[in-house]
Image (spheres, helix red, strand yellow):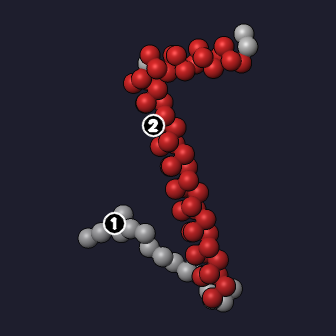
Amino acid sequence: MRLLDILKFSFKAMRSRKRRTYLTLLGIFLGVLTLTAVVSYAAGYGVAIQRIIKGGSLRVIYLIPRETSFTES
């Protein structure tokens, strides 16, 4: 098959299966969006950690609680 034939066949299949095409494009869009958000968050977190390290002494340990302890009375 030639490239033109393959493209015609592909577009014909996408027109006949609109819901499948829509869901596939939605999945690709959400995947790219999620990946971009995770990479951006990680990069921002790395910059924040570097600023904390540069601003303080190398002998200082920062303890930042994220949630409550397991044994609360």
Let me know if residue 59 appears in the view: no
Q: Which residue is drawn at 50% across and 42% down?
A: 29
Above or below — where is 46 with respect to 56? above
Please tell me which of labels 1 and 2 falls first in the chain: 2
Residue closer to the observer: 7 or 70? 7
The residue at the point 73 percent across, 13 percent down is 2
* Residue corresponding to mark 2: 26
SS of the residue under disc 1: loop
67 left or right of 54 in image: left
Quadrant of the drawing holding the C terminus: bottom left
Discs 1/2, front: 2
Q: In this view, does 31 lie above or below 71?
A: above
Outermost residue toward the top in this view: 1
Instruction: Tell me if label 1 and label 2 are in contact, CB under 8 Å.
Output: no
Q: Residue 36, percent across and down?
A: 56, 53
Task: Give the amino acid type for the residue marked by disc 1 in the picture.
Answer: Thr
Q: Where is residue 40 in the image (x, y as percent from the top left)?
A: 56, 61
- The circle drawn on residue 39 is none
Viewer-nearest residue: 48 or 4 = 4
Q: Give neighbour class at mark 2: few <14, some 14-19, many 20+ (Cα, 10 Å).
A: few
On the question of residue 56 being in view, the answer is yes
Q: Dividing the picture into quarters, in which one does residue 41 lie?
A: bottom right
Q: In the rendered image, which quarter is residue 5 located in?
A: top right
Q: Mark 1 points at which residue?
A: 71
| Disc 1 packing (10 Å; few <14; some 14–19; many ≥20) | few
Exactly how many numbered labels are in the figure?
Answer: 2
Relative to residue 55, is residue 69 drawn left or right? left
Q: Which of 20 and 63 is in front in this view?
A: 20
Quarter of the image where the N terminus is located = top right
Three-letter code for the amino acid on which mark 2 is drawn: Leu
The answer for how far apart the CA atoms under marks 1 and 2 are is 44 Å
